[in-house]
Amino acid sequence: MRPPKAAERPHTVTFHGHERTDPYAWLRDENWQQLMQKPEVLKRDIRKYLEAENAHTAAAMKDAEPAIQSLVEEMKGRIKRDDSTVPAPDGPCAYYQRYERDSQHPIFCRNRRITDEHGGPAFSWRQSEQVLLDVNRLAEGKPFFRVSAVEHSPDHRLLAYSSDDKGSETHDIIVRDIATGEIVDNFVKGTDGSIEWANDSRTLFYCVLDENHRPSLIYRHSIGQKQAKDVLVYEEKDPGFFVAMGKTESRRFLVINTHDHVTSEFHVIDADDPHRPPRLLASRTPGVEYHVTHHDGRFYIQTNADGAEDFKIATAPVDAPARDNWQDLVPHEPGRLLLGMRMTARFLARMERVDGLPRIVIRRLEDGVEHTIAFQEEAYDLGILPGYEYATTTLRFAYSSPTTPREVYDYDMEARSRVLKKRQEVPSGHDPALYACRRLMAPSTDGEMVPITVLHRRDTSIDGTAPCVLYGYGAYGASMPSAFAPNRFSLVDRGFVYATAHIRGGTERGYRWYREGRLQKKANTFRDYVAAAEHLIAQRYTSQGRIAAHGGSAGGLLVGAAVNMRPDLFGAAVAEVPFVDVLNTMTDGTLPLTPPEWPEWGNPITDADAYRTILGYSPYDNVAAKAYPNLLVTAGLADPRVTYWEPAKWVAKLRAKKTDSNLLLLKTNMAAGHAGAAGRFSKLEEIALIYAFLLKVFDRLGLVGGGCPGSANAGVRRRGRRNDAS
């Protein structure tokens, strides 16, 4: 089947005296706001092109269809089909999610609370179970359905939940009576999905999206009242700031967080008196971030104020929380990045990262005595899990590594002891001893050392012959966790090396690592990624042309920039919902993420230097007449974050310009958004397509159904669990 060729309809724009012609601008439906709610209104010529690309992808991958189905079954085999989360105690109940064996979606439940043999919270499994919400029933007959927030009222009588049936991240909110199951409120449409209860269990707060799909309005709702009577309590008028809701662990305050990527501002509402107006804590200052919790008459504030680049923790009186009254509690320590806080009645737990590895520090509030929870593997992931209870000495956290399945612990902060509550099961089998995980350091072009986490089977030859997936992101200060991702073993067991490059733009090496990979220094992100690829070649983990670049969203920008810079390094590239039309997007102030992301990329509308910088790396603007690696690109029609036309335009331009005969495939999910399919098994089909593409490119399709060559475990490891394709 011949690949489709998009029509060229030149559209010219001029900024700062520079004229650009975009031949594929017509793929952007000017009615995109309506498209988020009604995908069926997509213009006929655009739909025809996207469907032609989907048909071409299906034809090109037809020989891999048996492998795709085999990979799906293999990945399913790593899922405990009737899995359950560890119940989270809240007063008389314990709340949890579980799956039926063949269900796509979770079932939200609660049980009567009891105590286990260690004196900790337990529950009576199934004997007193009450099903609160079966998402499978709600999803019946819908191509896409996802429940985002599920929140029970403080008195445990009502359940509020938000759902999205398009993938556009536009949510409806419904409230049910838990005892009867009856809907008592079907009151809100067009929200971002967040829900917060006031302490009276009769008042809800929610956030509404504006006409450009930005969360900007906070409303108060009384149960049983029509939405038209809801009260607007906060409106953010700066299109560069998003609004989010939360609640302090003490349950004393509801918080309104107004933020972009580098600046934040908080207002609080008395949760016991929700009709009082919000109260400002500290006015926004460009470049100053802060986050707030509460304990015993004081706010606890994690902030980078006063030059604390890697953050500190300060406190301030509830009655006088302005910046002048902030007093340092945990001082700034360069190289120790504070990641978050969890407050209880007697202890403050904080997440930190030092030398690229996370740890938890427990501080006893009465005397300031601290101790640390850390692990010994070269690379691992550690995180504090949310909980309902404030008057507790128990902290729940999760640990995993690339070779160690996820473990959930309850930690007694007083006794300094922990109890394993759950270890992730891999029904088809997993032996950590078969795998090696290493942390490498790659020299970048300016001498900075870039961490790389490498996973491979111990019997994979490290002689340059192995294919390698090199995953990266490098934006917004997001760090790539060194966590257990069972789907990856479908590649690793077939002789792939799986590497994650912790490049600048993330915060793996502190906030400086982020600062050095944004705005005018964004090119460092791409140079670091190329340096990581070159280091893997030099260390004989792989060889030139045997690397698959992989990233999604802003990581797709990374992939696009890398294959423009050094296409010779890569044999394949996978760009999931890639942010590749950077300059056109950042000069379109109507798009949801454009104004809030000017601090990340620069504002090319007003700043000529930012314009030239983005023009220098934007993948779409730098496509050239040269050979590119095999490419698989994905998109979601209802995606509000990376709109469908970005990957579509990029593929159209690549197809017109490239000089090779390698695969160039675009797969658009016509019934989903940025996160792809909603069901846990449906998601596996998307991952299997990516893996089959890589196996096809590197001539390993014949290994589907078996382990890697020479493996003593050949033919045993097959199956997977819901996860991203990384």
Image: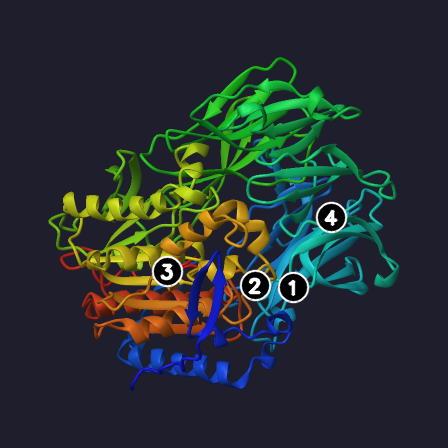
Q: Nearer the viewer, mark 3 or mark 1?
A: 3
Which residue was labeled with disc 3? 619
Which residue occupies the extreme front position in the image?
Answer: 17
Q: Nearer the viewer, mark 1 or mark 2?
A: 2
Q: Nearer the viewer, mark 4 or mark 3?
A: 3
Tag of residue 640: 2
Q: Say which residue appears at 67% left-offset and 63% top-offset.
A: 171
Nearer-N-terminus badge (2/3): 3
Which residue was labeled with disc 4? 196
Tag 4: Cα neighbours inside 10 Å, few (<14), some, or many (≥20)? Answer: many
Residue 611 can be seen, yes or no? yes
Question: Residue 114: x and y, percent?
Answer: 66, 40
Q: Say which residue appears at 51% left-offset and 63% top-offset.
A: 674
Above or below for 242 versus 53: above
Question: Residue 39: x and y, percent?
Answer: 59, 76
Tag of residue 170: 1
Q: Say which residue appears at 61% left-offset and 71% top-offset.
A: 139
The amino acid type, in three-letter code, at marker 1 is Thr
Q: CA distance from mark 1 to mark 2?
A: 9 Å
The amino acid type, in three-letter code, at marker 3 is Pro
The amino acid type, in three-letter code, at marker 4 is Glu
Label pair 1/2, CB-CB below 8 angstroms: yes
Q: Name the element at disc 2.
A: loop
